[in-house]
């Protein structure tokens, strides 16, 4: 059946293949650059880095299984013709390409849940490295609460996907009548809606911290933009949710091509996870001098005491003067690959500043 009563166009196999290859490859490069720059500048690799490495493994798995689906001429291709035009036939018959699409669909959801969950957790721990959690009690509480929510979300939906059909583990890639007995649409709706909500909570978490500073308006906007780069994945999540709602309300077996409809969901899932992974790495690396200049500094209120030496007399990569070695060690332990420092003038005081760029380690005298 080649009809499409959805508001979203079908995705061809070539487009699915491109996303499945390009996004994991760019993700590998981004994570490698993140870890490499940490080690090069002798900045410790911490929880946020290990979590993003784990997320990369699942994103690669998503790409691999979708490449397999395209190679089998199943994903992105029209559903094979049924023996009759009746709805019952579409619900009970299952060709080999259809089985492949259903299997790829199930595996993708199994991999996507921990991938997205780990990306969220990595981002939160990244924020905790940036901001002075010891001095910001409310941020500390909210970030830990969100860590708990995201961890529970990941575990709950991961096992809900695996055991969604109870002991009938083969039902997810069986005929539609078997799939429908597992309440798949209800579970997927719950997963997508909660995924979108937790994404929003994670991405807006650092915004109040930035806007509490005394930076100029332009710098606040630029800094907010960098930390919210991962919101580009929200568009993919929204599109996917729209398609799922139309499937649930209309019944895709009777209204549109089944395999191509599932391809839409898988394609946008790949986009969401891949883009979120890449974007979550961007604030930790120097991509271009212009980017560094535009978002160079974000300040936190009253974190470090004033230095005997003004920070302006030091190169930008010096977080603190050598006379403040104890403070510098504390700065390094809280750094996301970001330099924090404070400078004063006779008339005004600039707050501690965070540069979203990997920094060179200050040399001991």
Image (cartoon, grey):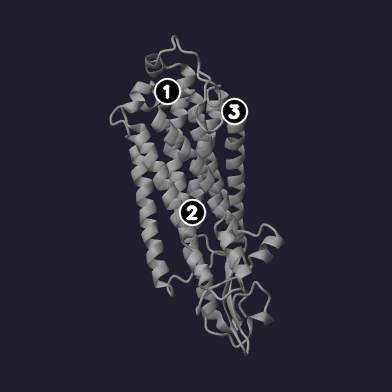
Rendered image: mark on residue 132:
none
Residue 333 on image: x %, y %: 50, 69
Q: Taking the image as drawn, is residue 170 in sight?
A: no
Q: Which residue is mark 1?
A: 253
Is 299 above or below relative to 269?
A: below
Q: Which residue is mark 3?
A: 12
- 182 is higher (above) or lower (below) than 307: above
- At x 46%, y 54%, the residue is 200
Give the Cα distance between marks 1 and 2: 42 Å
Q: Along the polypeptide, which appears first: circle 1 or circle 2?
A: 2
Q: Residues within 10 Å of mark 1 (few under 14, many from 20)?
A: some
Which is closer to the viewer, label 2 or label 3? Answer: 3
Of the numbered discs 2 and 3, the one sitting upstream in the chain is: 3
Quarter containing the C terminus: bottom right
Q: Residues within 10 Å of mark 2 (few under 14, many from 20)?
A: some
Residue 120 in sight here: yes
The residue most toward the left is 167
Frontmost of labels 1 and 3 is 1
Is label 1 in a helix, a strand or a loop? helix
In primary-sequence order, the first of circles 1 and 3 is 3
Q: Secondary structure at mark 2?
A: helix
Of residues 169 and 344, the one nearer the viewer is 344
Question: Hey, which residue is sitting farthest bottom in the picture?
Answer: 346
Dot 2 corresponds to which residue?
50
The furthest residue to the right: 289
Taking depth in this image into account, of 186 and 4 the one nearest to the observer is 4
């Amino acid at each position: 059946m080649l009809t499409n009563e959805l508001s979203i166009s079908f995705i061809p196999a070539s487009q699915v293949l491109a996303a499945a290859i390009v996004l994991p490859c760019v993700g590998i490069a981004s994570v490698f650059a993140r870890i490499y720059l940490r080690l090069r500048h002798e900045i410790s690799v911490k929880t946020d880095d290990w979590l993003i490495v784990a997320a990369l493994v699942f994103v690669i798995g998503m790409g691999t299984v979708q490449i397999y689906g395209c190679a089998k001429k199943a994903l992105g291709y029209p559903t094979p013709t049924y023996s009759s035009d009746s709805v019952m036939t579409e619900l009970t018959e299952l060709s080999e390409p259809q089985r492949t699409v259903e299997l790829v669909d199930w595996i993708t959801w199994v991999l996507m849940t921990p991938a997205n969950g780990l990306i969220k957790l990595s981002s939160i721990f990244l924020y905790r490295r940036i901001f002075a959690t010891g001095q910001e009690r409310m941020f500390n509480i909210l970030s830990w609460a969100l860590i708990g929510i995201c961890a529970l979300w990941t575990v709950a939906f991961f096992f809900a996907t695996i055991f969604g059909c109870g002991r009938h583990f083969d039902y997810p890639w069986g005929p539609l009548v078997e799939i429908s007995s597992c309440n798949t649409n209800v579970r997927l709706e719950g997963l997508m809606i909660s995924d979108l909500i937790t994404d929003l909570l994670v991405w807006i978490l650092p915004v109040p911290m930035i806007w509490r500073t005394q930076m100029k308006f332009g710098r606040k906007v630029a800094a907010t933009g960098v930390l919210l780069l991962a919101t580009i994945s929200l568009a993919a999540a929204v599109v996917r949710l729209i398609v799922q709602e139309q499937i649930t309300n209309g019944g895709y077996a009777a209204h549109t091509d089944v395999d191509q409809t599932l391809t839409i969901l898988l394609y946008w899932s790949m986009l969401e996870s891949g883009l979120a992974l890449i974007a979550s790495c961007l604030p930790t690396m120097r991509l271009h001098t212009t980017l560094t200049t535009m978002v160079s500094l974000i300040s936190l209120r009253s974190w470090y005491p004033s230095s005997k030496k003004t920070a302006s007399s030091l190169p930008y990569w010096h977080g603190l003067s050598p006379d403040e070695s104890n403070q510098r060690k504390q700065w390094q332990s809280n750094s996301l690959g970001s330099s924090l420092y404070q400078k004063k003038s006779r008339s005004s005081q600039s707050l501690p500043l965070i540069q979203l760029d990997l920094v060179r380690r200050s040399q001991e005298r």
